[in-house]
Image (spheres, rainbow, N blue to C red):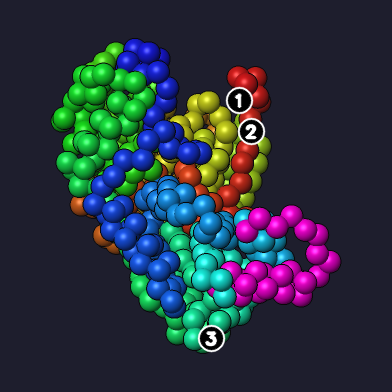
Amino acid sequence: MELGEAGLQEQPFRTHGRPLVFVHYSSQQAAFEFLSETYNRERGLGLFQGPPLAGKTAIIRHFAESLSDDAAVAVVDGAGLNTTALLEAVLSQFGYDLQFSSVNELINMVKVFVLQQTAAEQPPLLIIENTHALNPSALRVLCELSSLKVRTKSALRLILASNRSISSIVRAPAMDAISKRLTGDFHLEPLTPSETTDYLHAKLRAGGCFDPIGVLPLDVCDQLHMASAGWPGVIDRLVLLALAKAVKCPIGREYIEHPLVPDGTPSLFTDDAESATSGINGSNGLNGDGGPPKLFLTYNGRTLREMDLTRPRLLVGRSDHNDLCVNSRFISRHHALFVRQGVATFLMDLNSTNGTYVNSHRVSNHVLMHDDVISIGNHGIKFHDPYARDSIKLEGTGFDDTVIMKNIRDMRKLLAKENTQSLPIASGSAFSVIDSDQQDAT
């Protein structure tokens, strides 16, 4: 559907850049109060946490812009930054465009600026996004900066933001300088159903729509809340998809995506996710031969890739952010999901357009056996696990109808991967294959 057909003059559900309008809701207001209180405390150092697409970045940027023009504020994305990159980013945000030849010069310049500002009763504020992804050396420098004082006052206000729990990082012995200063820990909450409706209609009005309820009726807003679990970034993406698929207004409930994930998928936003990478139920993901199950991706009889199935779950589809990305027009954005439970491997089709087949039979969910051949589009995936030979034993591992359900919380986690590379997936676990059909199509 074209924007004009929905009464819109511009796209209000943006997934990148500055929001068209900043819509207020209760958890966001509480977050503002937390950020403001942290900034105004002499020892202010706070943790600001919430899952991907929870709206953290929008809140942080809006808060930074709300401060006076005289305030020195640096908002830095810490993902992958080492000591040098972190210090350069901080200085750049504080308005310095100087070339330094060593780390010592960089850190000394940051210290001088911070101490001078605090002595002038204008302590600077440093906000680090994706704190969990900072290089350990950068974390050590962060501890050094947090220890700076002017008389009895801490010289630098700090807000450490993350899309997962960072409590274990902060409490580590090496982070003692930060843990001693910690003044607050805030976790974002999702929108309520009524707030979701207000959020959607406010964005439509900001985009030029005079009849928001004629585009997104109340029952559809409720459906969007259920599908997104109330997280703003997920809501925006679901509406974008619905607008693209719908033919006319009002948008019907059938246009709201509901990806399926199994109940019990390990949480991606807690410290428990770290332990999940080593295995499930004590099995460590290993089969009876002492190694993990293997997947062989094939195309026209040719093996394109071999990978070990060592993760609790592996997502397959066309999107770049799947664990196994196969860039073919015959494969859906999120096509299928492999799940390990104990020694068994479970395959679930995610309502793909062209279906998922095991040994030429279409399946919605299936407990995999050794040498099963899975077909998705024009590609094949051969499942290799010599342990998986006893169907009675494997089908008794807890994969029943109660496992196959629309779990709102885990669906939100699945969609959240579209906007982040910070989820606990081991580096190098994803790979992309472009087939000749896709090249012709593009």
Q: Name, please, the residue furthest toward the right.
A: 101
Where in the figure is residue 121, as x and y percent of width and height?
51, 71
- Taking the image as shown, residue 327 lies to the left or right of residue 2, namely right
Secondary structure category for the residue under label 3: loop
Query: Regarding mark 2 in the picture, which secondary structure is present there?
Result: strand
Q: Which quadrant does the N terminus fall into?
A: top left
The three-letter code of the residue at mark 3 reads: Arg
Three-letter amino acid code of the residue under disc 2 = Ile
Q: Which residue position holds label 2? A: 434
Disc number at residue 151? Answer: 3
- Is 415 placed above or below 154 here? above
The residue segment tinted magenta is 94-118
Q: How far from the left and from the top, in percent, is residue 338?
A: 42, 50
Using the image, determine if residue 87 lies above or below residue 376: below
| In-front residue for pair 111/361 | 111
Q: Nearer the viewer, mark 3 or mark 1?
A: 3
Q: Position of residue 56 (x, y in %)?
A: 41, 53
Q: Amino acid at mark 1?
A: Gln
Q: Give the label on residue 438, or none.
A: 1
Q: Is residue 379 above or below residue 323?
A: above
The mark that comes first in sequence, 3 or 1, is: 3
* Residue situated in front as seen by the camera: 378 or 423: 423
Residue, x 55% and y 40% (percent of image)?
Answer: 320
Q: Position of residue 299 (x, y in %)?
A: 61, 34
Q: Is residue 88 above or below residue 260?
A: below
Q: Is residue 412 left or right of residue 99?
A: left
